[in-house]
Amino acid sequence: MKKLLSLLLVSCFIAGFGTGVLAKNSNPVIVTNEVILAKEPDTYLEIRHIVLRGTNEEIGKALGDIAQEWLGIKKLLPYAGPLYAEARRQYMEKNYPILLERMKGVAKSYGLSPTDNTYVTSGLYYDIFITPPGCSAVFFPADSTANGHDLVGHNIDFHTATMREMMGMKRVEGEHNLYSRDFVIELYPDKGYSSIVVGALDLLNGFQGGMNSEGLIVALLEDDLGTPSTDSNPLGDDVGGLNMLQLDRLILDTCATVDEAKMAILNNKLVAGFMPGHLLICDRSGKSFIFDISPKDFSYHFIDNNDRPQVITNHAVYLYPDASKFPTYTTKGTYNTFYRYAKLTDYVKAHQGKFSPDDVQEAMSLVYAHTTDIAEQSVGPLPHRTLWTMLYDINERSIEIKFYLKDGPIDPATGDPSLVFTEPFKFKLKKAGS
């Protein structure tokens, strides 16, 4: 664990702290690059909206340029040796040529040869690496909704702290809080599907939720009960294959259906991350599945929705298929993964009639994170908040997002704060062929 922590901290210093100020854009690939929610002294987040259109190499270069100007990533992370660099390029050429082209663009942005064997160009990491958030999500297939659309509700939750504080250390002046510099990125590449994603951590690949032009959604959540990787580089650059963020991006870039997504997962090598995660993947046909990974033998498990609403929180669903047999938990621990799963499934079962978009948002509000209870598994008593909540409409290819601003008044019944969100931002992805 100490070795891994050192790697993460050194990497963050290499990346730099960033200024948050962008030069005026003159790159035609960059259609939009603007702060849509500025961080104020009493608020938590900055949100940047980025729209890129061009070849994948041009998109990679544009993201490299933005990473340097916005995030202060002035130097890329080093490979362990030339062997690993060549292996990474060969893997991408065979399995993920879209990312290989974007890697060439990142190399160009940093003044490197596309065959440089020194620096890693397959990610633009900042603040912390490969850490899925604690989240909750529900997929509502069209047959269950009032407007006949496939809908998804998804909360993104995490500690409002720095990486050092997460590890029980004192924060350093200039460090950014986790998930405090977030993005909404729309990509319109020449090859691969167009997509819109919302996320942080890795500007090249990273997102916590996204949808492509074919109506496929990928939502990433932490598996609290999984086994973290403490021995290997969680980015995967010294062992080959894809980390979880890269796998998620590959699925959005190349898959139109849940069946294609399963094939992509099975036909790629996935690197165990610093904190384990699992996925909810949905498509426009009303199908969805949860992708779980065994903490014991790293075997893969797919749990299909069978035409019904599907709930996911932060435990492996294949290990606990029956909610009546969940481990004991207290209802005072409102961020406990089993509590939230039961809360959402009870809401779905008790609901009369079909679900409206407002119903989806009401469901997600029942499991907002606003506590510091022990179920959050941090080193110390750190606040845990819902940082943004999303409503996807697959048929419209739209996402409506409310972002966390700050804590509101304390609820006298629980002692926990209420949450103050922005008014909803709405984004709409262009459909294929439009």
Image (cartoon, helix red, strand yellow):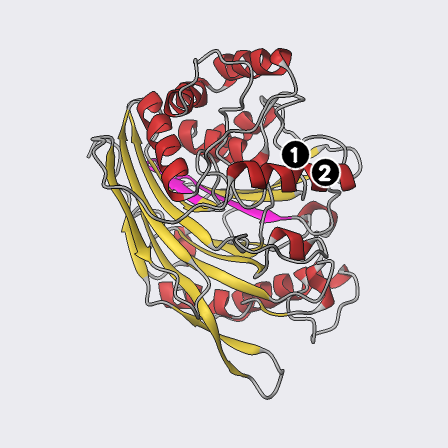
> Does residue 300 lie above or below 391 as drawn?
above
> Does residue 426 lie above or below 115 as drawn?
below
Rendered location of residue 136, percent (x, y): 55, 57
| Label 1: element kind | loop
Which residue is rendered at x = 48% and y = 13% of the image?
93
Tell me the tag on residue 4: 2
Rendered location of residue 141, percent (x, y): 43, 51
What is the span of residues highlighted in magenta in the rendered image?
A: 210-222
> Is mark 2 in CB contact (under 8 Å) with mark 1?
yes
Rendered location of residue 343, percent (x, y): 60, 68
Rendered location of residue 170, percent (x, y): 67, 58
Determine whether, in the image, residue 89 is placed left or right of residue 394. right
| Label 2: element kind | helix
The answer to whether residue 110 of the structure is visible from this angle is: yes
How crowded pointer 2 is (Cα within 10 Å; few <14, some 14-19, many 20+) is rated as some
Prevailing secondary structure of the magenta residues: strand
Determine whether, in the image, residue 365 is placed left or right of residue 36. right
How crowded pointer 1 is (Cα within 10 Å; few <14, some 14-19, many 20+) is rated as many
Badge 2 amino acid? Leu
Marks 2 and 1 sit apart, C-alpha to C-alpha, by 8 Å
**Quadrant assignment, res 10:** top right
33 or 100, which lies in front?
33
Q: Nearer the viewer, mark 2 or mark 1?
A: 2
